[in-house]
Amino acid sequence: MTQRHGFETLAIHAGQEPDHVTGAVVPPIHAVSTYQQDGVGGLRGGYEYSRTANPTRGALEECLAALEDGRRGLAFASGMAAEDCVLRAVCAPGNHVVIPDDAYGGTFRLFSRVFEPWGLAWTPAPIGDLAAVRAAIRPETRVIWCETPTNPLLGIADIEALAAIAHDAGALLVVDNTFASPYLQQPLALGADVVVHSTTKYLGGHSDVIGGALVTADDELGERLAYYQNATGAVAGPFDAWLVLRGARTLAVRMDRHCANAGRIAAMLTSHDRVAEVFYPGLPTHPGHEVAAKQMRAFGGMVSFRVKGGEQAAIEVCNRAELFILGESLGGVESLIEHPGRMTHASAAGGPLEVPGDLVRLSVGIEAVDDLIADLDRALR
Ligand SMILES: Cc1ncc(COP(=O)(O)O)c(C=O)c1O
């Protein structure tokens, strides 16, 4: 199936032809580790061992590649496993990477605690500021790592401009597209080389699975990543791959509602007297609004805000919310609230990616928006 079809069509059909034996319209869960060979080396459909390839994972991988308009999709046991795979595959000790100065805390921990001891140097830069990114590049820079929107401050980076900077420097642009999802933003079409996902989030969409993905713009890099995926082995199991694929089928309609609800909530927070500052790229006052409008279909379901009264006031808002469930993660149908400084970004404390103590992050779900607004208003008072 090709990109000539619309996004919603690809989400439901790419990699998901009805089963040729039974006609089942949903790809089966192939809970299997190995495959009978027709004589030594006589593989049926290329299947040999499920770490290397499994039909259920393959269905998801084909769908992910189609949704990102890429050449090769690879599904992993988690978003972190996907990040680990791409860094091992394209970097070597002695190399350097530019990372966002606002990013998921676990990504920062991977660079600072796992890859730095391995010999990979890193420099944080405000990736919305192209001059700052250029200044951070060194002769040994191999990757510019980008999140847009960023987690948790919803900063925006210009993917097309970053791709040009990376390529001029002989580096790759890797974009973590978790917050936007491929429905809202397709970084490969803007020049990125690799897209990373925590499929735990919007792609899965129901807070019932941990998963990750890589999608590449070209076959050669895709083949290299597939080699590392098999060699290091953090693959998505067939049950998890099936759950992510089921979520992906409804991604477009869910995202439309996430975005509509988040837009209403951002507007409500902007005029709330207990709120000091709101971070949402859909607000015309957001410094990245124009770039977001250029490269995104809509502005996403994540909203962050600073509470008047400091860290304790922010923690109390999180504790008082009822409909917004206090918890980490994002991208599920249910709304979540969290305190990044103490929760998702605790590992960034004391470092260059530390987040403000008075910050609250919302993953706006698809419930009735008036109920969500009433809950937040109650929690803020
Ligand atoms: C932007 C972003 N990237 C990557 C990850 C890591 O994904 P996972 O938790 O599936 O390993 C997360 C997790 O919260 C995230 O928010």
Image (cartoon, rainbow, N blue to C red):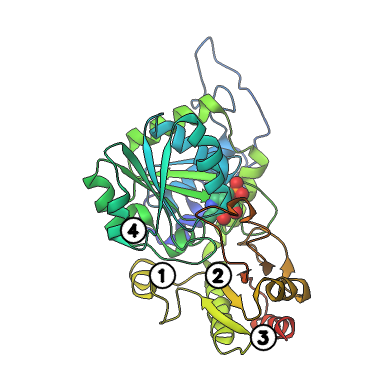
Query: Could you tell me which secondary element the residue under label 2 belongs to?
Result: loop
Image quadrant assignment for residue 307: bottom right
Residue occupying image coordinates x 41% and y 81%:
285
Q: Amino acid at mark 2?
A: Gly
Residue occupying image coordinates x 65% and y 35%:
30
Which residue position holds label 4?
159
Closer to the eye: label 2 or 1:
2
**Is ligand 1 within 8 Å of the beta carbon of the residue shown at mark 4?**
no
Task: From this view, report whether residue 146 is shown above or below residue 142.
Answer: below
Which residue position holds label 3?
370
Gap in angstroms between the C-alphas marked 4 and 2: 20 Å
The x, y position of residue 113, in whole percent, is: 56, 39
Query: Could you tell me which secondary element the residue under label 4 belongs to?
Result: helix
The x, y position of residue 143, in whole percent, is: 36, 43
Quarter of the rendering occupied by the C terminus: bottom right
Closer to the eye: label 3 or 4:
4
